[in-house]
Image (spheres, grey):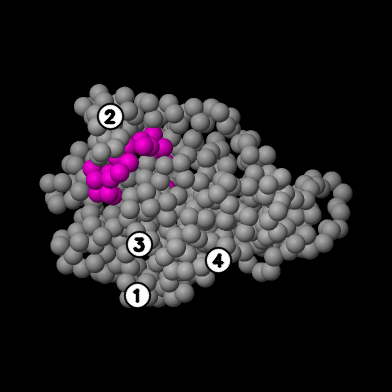
Amino acid sequence: MIIENVYVAPVVGPEIESGYIRIEGDRIAEVGSGPPEPRPGETRIDGAGCLATPGLVNTHHHLYQWASQGLAQDATLFEWLVASYQVWAAMDAEVVKGAAAAGLGYLALSGCTLSSDHHYVFPSGRGDLFAAGIEAARELGIRFHPARGSMDRGHSQGGLPPDIVVEDRETILAATAEAIDAYHDPSFSSKLRIAVAPCSPFSVTAELMTGAAELARAKGVRLHTHLAETLDEDEHCVAAFGVRPVDYMEKLGWLGSDVWFAHTVHLSDGDIDKLAATGTGAAHCPSSNGRLGAGIARVSEMLRRGANVGIGVDGNASSELTTLAGEMRQALLFQRAAYGPAALTARQALEMATLGGARNLGRENELGSLEPGKLADLALWRVDGSFASAVTDPVCQLVFATRQPPLARLLVGGETVVQDDELRTVDQDASGRAGAEAHRRLMRLAREQGFSVKKEVHR
Ligand SMILES: [Zn+2]
């Protein structure tokens, strides 16, 4: 396959105003400028009027939360969690499958070719919740890095979640090891990799954190958790453990190039230097941080000090219908509003959403930029639309625009997943309906357990 006459923003190396990308099998064979040498039998895609970027990488998500959007709209993180836990306690595999089908489809439509997912609520006797998300990703055909999440520190042990949504440590570690053995594919072209992800300092014991790190390192998989999201968490860590979040993680052996944290909003200069020195990554989720009033992560300072930052949409219940492409804009505007117009460029935002994400997930050698030898994961954005055509810089148009440019193509390993803003591997309307049905089903199951939806929408 060859995409020609296209503006190429490869993220690594100079941009090409009119060039081509040649794809052989699931890899990029060639990226060049001008017209390509034609080869007989090659499928030619005319990229005139389009911008080619690497596929976007989503480094933090909770797909199941598609089913619990719109609740506790005016709450802080802790208030929102307390309101949501009782709803999540009612979910089953059918809810997760429908939520994941909608959530992943929505991501693909905003240019995402690789998504992580952090699932940490496993009510017992509700079917195989972890497998349900994997099935949805397989059907859609995008790369998927689900993290087996967990909570073992319920209310009775000083944690935030009610005891009904936590599991015991042995069960968690055994189920996590089982998930890795069953699904983890370390190959170059892998579409499925597993990570180990206890939920957060305020819902997990120190013993589980260290046990999880030992397990992940023994199995050669990555580690993920929420960290430094709110000032409430800061206070909780100081009160419960005597140290702030990053120092707590350091004590537990949780800093390293195999670790990425979600949020990292409240970091000191020293915290940032620790992340940079150890190669620990961060997933920046600006819409979620804005929705919950958590604060603005010091992303430009993190980049300046050499820390790796990727982007994440976070679960739809705390970010609502946030698109991955839109998070580049949100990241850009947050940094500029807080630190001035030079704080973050459109190209830096694009790099975070692609190569930065690939680094967080340990895949920078395989994807995240348009270079020969890398996987053919790319997005082709149509930037010659009637209103948009007045913008001379296509990268500016992609990153600054409130309305995402039409997605002419989304390729995952050279296979078309989206064409002309429509999912091509699955029935798009059916995916949307599955998400709505998952929401109705979850609310019904939650009501049967005594949850009042009306009371929890907003204060
Ligand atoms: Zn999260």
Q: CA distance from mark 4 to mark 1?
A: 22 Å
Q: Left or right: 86 with respect to 219?
A: left
The yes-or-no answer for disc 3 within 8 Å of ligand 1 is no
- Specify the label residue 269 is tagged with: 1
Q: Earlier in the sequence, mark 4 or mark 3?
A: 3
As helix, strand or loop, the secondary structure at mark 1 comes to helix
Q: What amino acid is at disc 3?
A: Val
Instruction: Kindly report which numbered mark, 4 or 1, lies closer to the viewer in this rendering.
Output: 4
Q: What amino acid is at disc 4?
A: Thr
As helix, strand or loop, the secondary structure at mark 4 comes to loop
- In the orientation shown, which residue stands out farthest toward the left? 156
Q: Is residue 382 visible?
A: no
Image-quadrant location for residue 285: bottom left
Q: What amino acid is at disc 2?
A: Lys
As helix, strand or loop, the secondary structure at mark 3 comes to loop
Q: CA distance from mark 4 to mark 3?
A: 20 Å
- Do callouts 2 and 1 mark residues in contact (Cβ within 8 Å)? no
**Magenta segment, which residues?**
60-82
Q: Earlier in the sequence, mark 4 or mark 1?
A: 1
Q: Which residue is mark 3?
A: 265
Q: How many dots with numbers?
A: 4
- Specify the label residue 345 is tagged with: 4
x then y, percent, for residue 345: 55, 66
Q: Which residue is mark 2?
A: 454
- Specify few, some or many for label 3: CA neighbours under 10 Å numbering under 14, 14-19, or 20 or more: many
